[in-house]
Image (cartoon, rainbow, N blue to C red):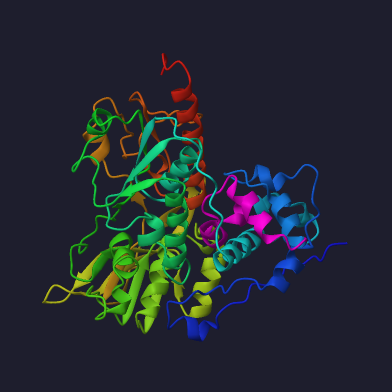
Amino acid sequence: MPVKQRTPMPMQDPAERAKNFSQVALGYTEEMALAEAARCLQCKNPQCVVGCPVSVQIPKFIGLIKEKKYREAIDVIKETNSLPAVCGRVCPQEHQCESKCVLLRTGQPIAIGRLERFAADWEAQNGPVIPERPASNGKKVAIVGSGPSGLTAAGDLAKLGYEVTIFESLHEPGGVLIYGIPEFRLPKEVVRREVEYVKALGVKIETDVVVGRTITIDDLFEEGFEAVYVASGAGLPMFMHIPGENLNGVYSANEYLTRVNLMKAYLFPEWDTPIKRGKRVVVVGAGNVAMDAVRCALRLGAEEACIVYRRSRAEMPARAEEVENAEEEGVKFHFLTNPVEIVGDEKGWVKGIKCVKMELGEPDQSGRRRPVPIPGSEFFMECDIVIMALGTSPNPIISQTTPGLKAQSWGGLIVDEKTGRTTRERVWAGGDAVTGSATVILAMGAGKLAAKDIHEFLSGPQDKW
């Protein structure tokens, strides 16, 4: 019988890690990986694969780890996933592959993500093997955005012989992986390593190119690209539109995390990116981005960092693992609480927020019970930084500058769910540019879907869109 409990992940001590930006989860040793791999039942009809958005052959690579064939294991993963070191660290496996594991019936599921990370980290230590490039088929494809969706589509198309160029608006490729997810969850050297692997497949990356401003999609077609995949993400932050949101000391989570991660504000003054280091920091929201922001605030020296969320703990969208890590590090949570005003001092800096207590009423369109204000429950909370982590939407710059490319009223591009095709011929889209803010692995799944359809379209008669 397999061991019911999964092999624990070694972690930095909470008191220590709350003061640094080094990785919290330290990764399996070989002994740990072998013990965890031995738990796998090697199901003949593996539902874990069904639960994986990029169809990694999970029992196969775990079986190879069990046999100590680590090179073969990472090769199996990379047949369908070009970013295993990223996925092994940040994907919500508990809602996907691991949720389908049969061991859940009697105990804990296989730690699939941790084993994927082990294989990827083994490769990093022993050197990657780059697949031999196929002969060019002479067809050019443009990718807009170098986040997980764009990198995935680019890698898949390059393996099929396409000449692929990624156009990235920032000065460094990686998208949300490089600007959004903190170093302690996803070291940037890991992201750069994954980007280098995609480049080694033959993909070209041009940075500091804002498609829709520097160049348009029509320009790309004129330059000889036969297809365009829009994977520009969702970088437009949302706000509550309450009084005081324009005060000094109010950040969107996007700006805050970009300063901390991409621009290395936590290394100031070695890196010339200043950021306000508050004593009392309030983060509004309860998703993974909110957890990232509040944990960064702690590491930047906050004496008190808290989450303010209008629903209860049960409705929190963040991964349970990230919530637990935040709690261990000292983050405080104020549930059923909603800001109604940000209050400033005479110099225009934040000095606190006015909040109201909430109760849960009838379910809304999302299926979650709608929070309703409790009359007379207003109170004041002192703080000097407020970070809005309420979600993001796609920037409309591409849809506004591309004739025939239609978007939803909230900004997401309209696509065929089975193919990723947009309303503009030869333009595909996927990831957060379509769905709004979602997970890394779902964006990767969209990239694979689009790459497959791009190949089928460009290889066929092309007489019907």
Picture quarter with the N terminus: bottom right
Q: Which residue lies furthest to the left in this view?
A: 347
Assign the magenta stretch its main secondary structure: helix
The one nearer the camera, 449 or 235, is: 449
Residue 119 lies, in percent from the top left, at 63, 61
**Residue 21 to residue 205: above or below:** below
* Res 105 visible: yes
Picture quarter with the C terminus: top left
Residue at the location (61% across, 66% down)? 122
Residue at the location (51% across, 38% down)? 134
Q: Is residue 81 magenta?
A: yes
Residue 68 lies, in percent from the top left, at 74, 63
Residue 202 lies, in percent from the top left, at 43, 45
**Residue 221 to residue 103: above or below:** above
Q: Does the magenta stretch include residue 462?
A: no
* Res 109 visible: no
Among the 4 quarters of the image, the one containing residue 30 = bottom right
Total numbered badges shown on the rendered structure: 0
Residue 419 lies, in percent from the top left, at 48, 29
Residue at the location (38% across, 60% down)? 178
- Where are the magenta residues, as a range? 67-95
User: Going by the image, does 247 lie left or right of 54?
Assistant: left
Residue at the location (66% across, 73% down)? 29
**Residue 355 to residue 328: above or below:** above
Among the 4 quarters of the image, the one containing residue 222 = top left
**Residue 67 to residue 49: above or below:** below
